[in-house]
Image (cartoon, grey):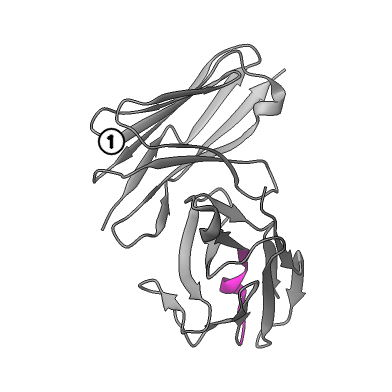
Protein backbone atom coordinates (compact mmCIF):
# COMPACT_ATOMS: atom_id res chain seq x y z
CA UNK A 1 0.00 0.00 0.00
CA UNK A 2 0.90 3.66 -0.22
CA UNK A 3 3.19 4.97 2.50
CA UNK A 4 3.10 8.37 4.13
CA UNK A 5 5.86 9.47 6.47
CA UNK A 6 5.96 12.27 8.99
CA UNK A 7 8.89 13.97 10.61
CA UNK A 8 9.52 14.41 13.42
CA UNK A 9 7.53 11.74 15.23
CA UNK A 10 7.60 13.81 18.38
CA UNK A 11 8.87 17.21 19.40
CA UNK A 12 9.09 19.19 22.62
CA UNK A 13 9.53 22.92 22.36
CA UNK A 14 9.38 26.03 24.46
CA UNK A 15 6.44 28.37 24.34
CA UNK A 16 6.89 31.02 21.67
CA UNK A 17 8.98 28.95 19.29
CA UNK A 18 7.89 27.66 15.90
CA UNK A 19 7.80 24.02 14.91
CA UNK A 20 7.78 22.58 11.41
CA UNK A 21 6.28 19.17 10.68
CA UNK A 22 6.91 17.42 7.37
CA UNK A 23 4.57 15.04 5.62
CA UNK A 24 5.84 12.98 2.69
CA UNK A 25 4.20 10.52 0.35
CA UNK A 26 6.96 7.98 -0.25
CA UNK A 27 5.76 5.93 -3.19
CA UNK A 28 3.04 7.99 -4.80
CA UNK A 29 2.24 11.53 -5.79
CA UNK A 30 -0.27 13.43 -3.74
CA UNK A 31 -1.80 16.54 -5.19
CA UNK A 32 -3.80 16.89 -2.02
CA UNK A 33 -2.76 16.26 1.54
CA UNK A 34 -4.76 16.76 4.69
CA UNK A 35 -3.72 17.89 8.14
CA UNK A 36 -5.59 16.64 11.18
CA UNK A 37 -5.29 17.34 14.84
CA UNK A 38 -6.19 14.82 17.51
CA UNK A 39 -6.55 15.41 21.23
CA UNK A 40 -6.21 12.48 23.64
CA UNK A 41 -9.18 10.13 23.48
CA UNK A 42 -10.76 12.29 20.81
CA UNK A 43 -11.51 12.06 17.14
CA UNK A 44 -9.49 13.48 14.28
CA UNK A 45 -10.33 17.07 13.49
CA UNK A 46 -9.57 18.25 9.99
CA UNK A 47 -7.51 21.42 10.14
CA UNK A 48 -6.77 22.14 6.51
CA UNK A 49 -6.45 20.76 3.04
CA UNK A 50 -3.05 21.24 1.47
CA UNK A 51 -3.02 21.67 -2.30
CA UNK A 52 0.15 21.33 -4.31
CA UNK A 53 1.10 24.61 -5.91
CA UNK A 54 -1.65 26.65 -4.32
CA UNK A 55 -2.83 27.97 -1.00
CA UNK A 56 -4.15 25.65 1.63
CA UNK A 57 -7.83 25.60 2.49
CA UNK A 58 -8.44 25.96 6.20
CA UNK A 59 -11.40 24.70 8.17
CA UNK A 60 -13.53 27.10 10.12
CA UNK A 61 -11.92 28.11 13.38
CA UNK A 62 -8.38 27.20 12.33
CA UNK A 63 -6.01 30.18 12.26
CA UNK A 64 -4.10 30.18 8.99
CA UNK A 65 -1.45 32.53 10.35
CA UNK A 66 -0.93 30.20 13.28
CA UNK A 67 -0.75 27.00 11.27
CA UNK A 68 1.20 27.68 8.10
CA UNK A 69 0.91 25.06 5.41
CA UNK A 70 3.13 24.73 2.38
CA UNK A 71 2.74 22.08 -0.31
CA UNK A 72 5.87 22.62 -2.35
CA UNK A 73 5.86 19.40 -4.32
CA UNK A 74 3.71 16.41 -5.14
CA UNK A 75 5.32 14.47 -2.32
CA UNK A 76 5.82 17.00 0.44
CA UNK A 77 3.60 19.16 2.60
CA UNK A 78 4.73 21.01 5.70
CA UNK A 79 2.81 22.35 8.67
CA UNK A 80 4.48 25.04 10.74
CA UNK A 81 3.02 25.84 14.13
CA UNK A 82 4.09 29.42 14.70
CA UNK A 83 4.68 30.89 18.14
CA UNK A 84 3.54 27.68 19.76
CA UNK A 85 1.78 27.74 23.11
CA UNK A 86 0.88 24.92 25.50
CA UNK A 87 -2.66 24.75 24.10
CA UNK A 88 -1.13 23.79 20.73
CA UNK A 89 0.15 20.57 22.27
CA UNK A 90 -1.53 17.79 20.36
CA UNK A 91 -1.10 14.88 17.98
CA UNK A 92 -0.84 16.17 14.40
CA UNK A 93 -1.52 13.69 11.62
CA UNK A 94 -1.29 14.17 7.89
CA UNK A 95 -2.89 12.06 5.21
CA UNK A 96 -2.80 11.87 1.45
CA UNK A 97 -4.84 10.43 -1.36
CA UNK A 98 -3.30 8.76 -4.36
CA UNK A 99 -5.54 10.11 -7.06
CA UNK A 100 -3.78 8.11 -9.75
CA UNK A 101 -4.96 4.93 -8.07
CA UNK A 102 -8.49 6.20 -8.39
CA UNK A 103 -9.56 5.39 -4.87
CA UNK A 104 -10.77 7.62 -2.09
CA UNK A 105 -8.78 5.85 0.57
CA UNK A 106 -6.65 8.19 2.59
CA UNK A 107 -3.25 7.04 3.75
CA UNK A 108 -2.24 8.42 7.09
CA UNK A 109 1.19 9.31 8.34
CA UNK A 110 2.33 8.02 11.71
CA UNK A 111 1.63 11.38 13.34
CA UNK A 112 3.71 13.94 15.21
CA UNK A 113 3.22 14.44 18.90
CA UNK A 114 3.87 18.07 19.81
CA UNK A 115 4.41 19.13 23.41
CA UNK A 116 4.79 22.82 24.12
CA UNK A 117 6.23 23.67 27.51
CA UNK B 1 -22.63 20.95 8.44
CA UNK B 2 -22.48 17.22 8.14
CA UNK B 3 -22.05 15.29 11.36
CA UNK B 4 -20.97 11.74 11.84
CA UNK B 5 -21.98 10.25 15.17
CA UNK B 6 -20.61 7.06 16.59
CA UNK B 7 -21.70 4.97 19.54
CA UNK B 8 -20.72 3.73 21.97
CA UNK B 9 -17.77 5.88 22.94
CA UNK B 10 -16.20 3.06 24.94
CA UNK B 11 -16.73 -0.68 25.04
CA UNK B 12 -15.07 -3.10 27.41
CA UNK B 13 -15.49 -6.77 26.58
CA UNK B 14 -14.17 -10.09 27.75
CA UNK B 15 -12.02 -11.86 25.22
CA UNK B 16 -14.25 -14.04 23.08
CA UNK B 17 -17.28 -11.77 23.33
CA UNK B 18 -18.67 -9.95 20.33
CA UNK B 19 -18.42 -6.20 19.76
CA UNK B 20 -20.41 -3.77 17.63
CA UNK B 21 -19.97 -0.07 16.94
CA UNK B 22 -22.56 2.03 15.15
CA UNK B 23 -22.13 5.05 12.94
CA UNK B 24 -24.83 7.53 11.90
CA UNK B 25 -24.57 10.44 9.53
CA UNK B 26 -26.81 13.49 9.42
CA UNK B 27 -26.72 13.33 5.62
CA UNK B 28 -26.61 10.63 2.98
CA UNK B 29 -23.10 9.38 2.33
CA UNK B 30 -21.62 8.46 -1.02
CA UNK B 31 -19.51 5.91 0.80
CA UNK B 32 -18.29 5.16 4.28
CA UNK B 33 -14.86 4.16 5.47
CA UNK B 34 -13.69 2.46 8.62
CA UNK B 35 -10.34 2.96 10.30
CA UNK B 36 -8.61 1.39 13.27
CA UNK B 37 -6.20 3.26 15.50
CA UNK B 38 -4.13 1.28 17.93
CA UNK B 39 -3.09 2.98 21.19
CA UNK B 40 -0.29 5.41 20.38
CA UNK B 41 -0.65 4.77 16.66
CA UNK B 42 -2.25 6.39 13.67
CA UNK B 43 -5.48 5.51 11.85
CA UNK B 44 -5.21 2.59 9.48
CA UNK B 45 -7.72 2.08 6.71
CA UNK B 46 -9.84 -1.05 7.10
CA UNK B 47 -12.51 -0.91 4.42
CA UNK B 48 -14.79 1.21 2.28
CA UNK B 49 -18.47 0.55 1.66
CA UNK B 50 -20.18 2.13 -1.32
CA UNK B 51 -23.45 0.42 -2.13
CA UNK B 52 -26.71 0.71 -0.26
CA UNK B 53 -27.16 -2.32 2.00
CA UNK B 54 -23.64 -3.54 1.32
CA UNK B 55 -22.09 -6.08 3.67
CA UNK B 56 -18.41 -6.92 3.65
CA UNK B 57 -16.44 -9.31 5.79
CA UNK B 58 -12.80 -9.41 6.80
CA UNK B 59 -12.22 -12.56 8.83
CA UNK B 60 -14.00 -11.81 12.14
CA UNK B 61 -15.01 -8.29 11.14
CA UNK B 62 -18.34 -7.61 9.42
CA UNK B 63 -19.12 -4.20 7.99
CA UNK B 64 -22.60 -3.05 6.97
CA UNK B 65 -23.82 0.01 5.10
CA UNK B 66 -27.43 0.96 5.67
CA UNK B 67 -30.08 0.94 2.98
CA UNK B 68 -30.44 4.70 3.23
CA UNK B 69 -26.65 5.13 3.19
CA UNK B 70 -26.81 7.16 6.40
CA UNK B 71 -25.64 4.56 8.86
CA UNK B 72 -23.10 1.81 9.16
CA UNK B 73 -21.91 -0.74 11.64
CA UNK B 74 -18.80 -2.76 12.40
CA UNK B 75 -19.22 -6.06 14.18
CA UNK B 76 -16.35 -8.13 15.54
CA UNK B 77 -17.04 -11.75 16.36
CA UNK B 78 -15.18 -13.39 19.23
CA UNK B 79 -12.91 -10.51 20.09
CA UNK B 80 -9.21 -11.03 20.69
CA UNK B 81 -6.71 -8.86 22.53
CA UNK B 82 -5.29 -7.82 19.17
CA UNK B 83 -8.60 -6.09 18.41
CA UNK B 84 -7.86 -3.45 21.04
CA UNK B 85 -7.94 0.09 19.69
CA UNK B 86 -10.25 2.85 18.58
CA UNK B 87 -12.47 2.26 15.58
CA UNK B 88 -13.50 5.27 13.53
CA UNK B 89 -16.04 5.56 10.78
CA UNK B 90 -15.62 8.37 8.29
CA UNK B 91 -17.61 9.77 5.43
CA UNK B 92 -17.04 12.38 2.78
CA UNK B 93 -19.03 15.55 2.96
CA UNK B 94 -20.23 17.47 -0.06
CA UNK B 95 -16.98 19.39 -0.15
CA UNK B 96 -15.01 16.20 -0.58
CA UNK B 97 -13.57 16.24 2.91
CA UNK B 98 -13.37 13.13 5.05
CA UNK B 99 -15.28 13.67 8.29
CA UNK B 100 -14.58 11.28 11.15
CA UNK B 101 -16.92 10.02 13.80
CA UNK B 102 -15.91 10.30 17.43
CA UNK B 103 -14.63 6.76 17.49
CA UNK B 104 -15.35 3.77 19.69
CA UNK B 105 -12.55 2.69 21.98
CA UNK B 106 -12.49 -1.06 22.42
CA UNK B 107 -10.71 -2.72 25.30
CA UNK B 108 -10.52 -6.50 25.58
CA UNK B 109 -9.91 -8.26 28.86
CA UNK B 110 -8.01 -11.52 28.45
When the figure is inspected, residue B12 is found, relative to residue B47, above or below; the finding is above
SS under mark 1: loop
Q: Which residue is mark 1?
A: B69
When the figure is inspected, residue A37 is found, relative to residue B72, above or below; the finding is below
Q: Residues within 10 Å of mark 1 (few under 14, many from 20)?
A: many
Left or right of residue B97, residue B62 in this image: right
Tell me what residue is drawn at x 49 percent, y 76 percent.
Answer: A51
Which quarter of the picture shows residue B36?
top right
Q: Observer-nearest residue: A113 or B55?
A: B55
Residue A81 image point, x, y percent: 60, 80
Chain at numbered mark 1: B
Which quarter of the picture shows residue A100?
bottom right
What is the magenta range?
A83-91
Residue A57 image point, x, y percent: 42, 76
Confirm whether the magenta stretch covers residue A86: yes
Confirm whether the magenta stretch covers residue A72: no
Residue A99 image point, x, y percent: 51, 60
Amino acid sequence: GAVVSQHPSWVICKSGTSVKIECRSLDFQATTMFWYRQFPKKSLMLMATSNEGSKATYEQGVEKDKFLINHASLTLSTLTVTSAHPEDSSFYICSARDLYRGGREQFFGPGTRLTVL
Amino acid sequence: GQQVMQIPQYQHVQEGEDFTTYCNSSTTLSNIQWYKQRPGGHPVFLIQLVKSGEVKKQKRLTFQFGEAKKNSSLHITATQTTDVGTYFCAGYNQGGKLIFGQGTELSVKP
